[in-house]
Image: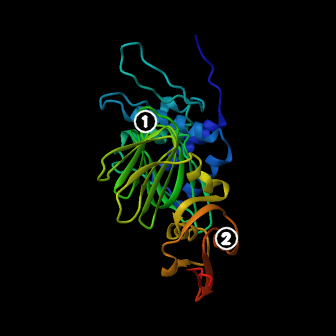
Amino acid sequence: MTESIHHDPIQQVAADWFAKLQGDPALEDWTAFQAWLEADPAHAPAYEAVEAVWLDLEDLPANDTVPDPAVQAPLAANVTPLRRATGAPRRRVLIGLGAAAAAAIVALLAGPRLTQPTFTDYSTRRGETREIALADGSRLTLAPSTTLRVSLGAKQRDVTLVDGEASFDIAHLENRPFVVAVGAREVRVLGTEFNILSHTGRLAVSVRRGLVAVSGGQEGTVKLARGQQLVQLPGASARTREVAPDTAFAWKSGKLIYDRTPLTEVVGDLNRYVATPIRVDPSAASVTVSGVLLIDEEAAMVRRLELFAPIVSETMAGEVILKAKPARR
């Protein structure tokens, strides 16, 4: 029986993007690719399908026959996985990639393999947030003043959180764990939703859905489930505590939630949002903050902070200084 293969323009473009990004793409190419991914919810799954075929071909034994580009060229632009008969080794072949894309992928298979993973860098400026849709179906949200690197490999998906804060909603892929490197630690998952803050020596890993394993610390591997958070402050040991699952994610909806949090930590957060640096005077070093701060114009945030804590602010020499409020006599 013969099956008709329909031309899928989205799959065609996905194949063209995949072929283009295997070389040495310029920054403008990555920017254009990211814009294409985010333009339509159907784009990321289409790209993932092309990538899946590539990953299967990467696993072919060295003596397997590579498809002839001349045979692949006339086929239409769908990616259809074909399996051998039962008992034979599993493999897939490219069916229907556009001629140029198919030829490019076959040429890559025949040539030298990439020995180093390709990383894509993402960052946000002070006060800016950004949502990233990855080709594997995962979604990342970057808080202000955040930098991270992403590499989607054949066996593992890797992210390095260089600095800042990000939330992760990870697509479940059984044989491709998602690993976030943050300092000397690793956060490993298969599919879950979690948030990581790593800034000025502070680390907080919070889980809203699923299970993550945090390793690399003196306490060994720590597994965190929904509503649990691993926290480590400069010069202190890491500890695990229970938290409201949505608290660590509140920044995504324009709020920062604190419960008896040292003022220095609160200011560390605010400095990723405001243009004028904020500094805690030694007189206010022991002050703690409880309340919900709306992410707003910076002067308004400082005024709200003064309502939540016994402090006063002074602006001088291009910075805002928070001092302990004088005791009444």
User: Is 109 left or right of 97, judged from the image as shown?
Assistant: left
Sequence-wise first label, 1 or 2: 1
Callout 1, which amino acid?
A: Leu
- Give coordinates of residue 193: x percent, y percent: 53, 43
Q: Secondary structure at mark 1?
A: helix
Write the residue at 56% across / 43% down: 16
The part of the image, by quadrant, that contains residue 83 is top left
Q: Quadrant of the C terminus?
A: bottom right
User: Is 302 left or right of 221, judged from the image as shown?
Assistant: right
- Give coordinates of residue 39: x percent, y percent: 67, 47
- Give coordinates of residue 21: x percent, y percent: 50, 49
Q: Secondary structure at mark 2?
A: helix
Write the residue at 50% across / 35% down: 172
Residue projecting furthest to the bottom: 317
Q: Quadrant of the N terminus?
A: top right
Which of discs 1 and 2 lies nearer the camera? The answer is 2
Write the residue at 30% across / 32% down: 62
Comparing 177 with 15, the one in front is: 177
Comparing 282 with 40, the one in front is: 282
Residue for badge 1: 55
Q: Is residue 239 above or below residue 95?
A: below
Residue for badge 2: 307
Residue projecting furthest to the front: 329
User: Is 288 left or right of 254, judged from the image as shown?
Assistant: left
Residue projecting furthest to the top: 1
User: Is 194 left or right of 300, judged from the image as shown?
Assistant: left
Q: Is residue 92 above or below residue 124?
A: above
- Give coordinates of residue 60: x percent, y percent: 35, 30
Packing grade of label 1 (10 A; few <14, some 14-19, many >=20) is some
Spatial separation of the CA atoms under disc 1 and disc 2 = 56 Å
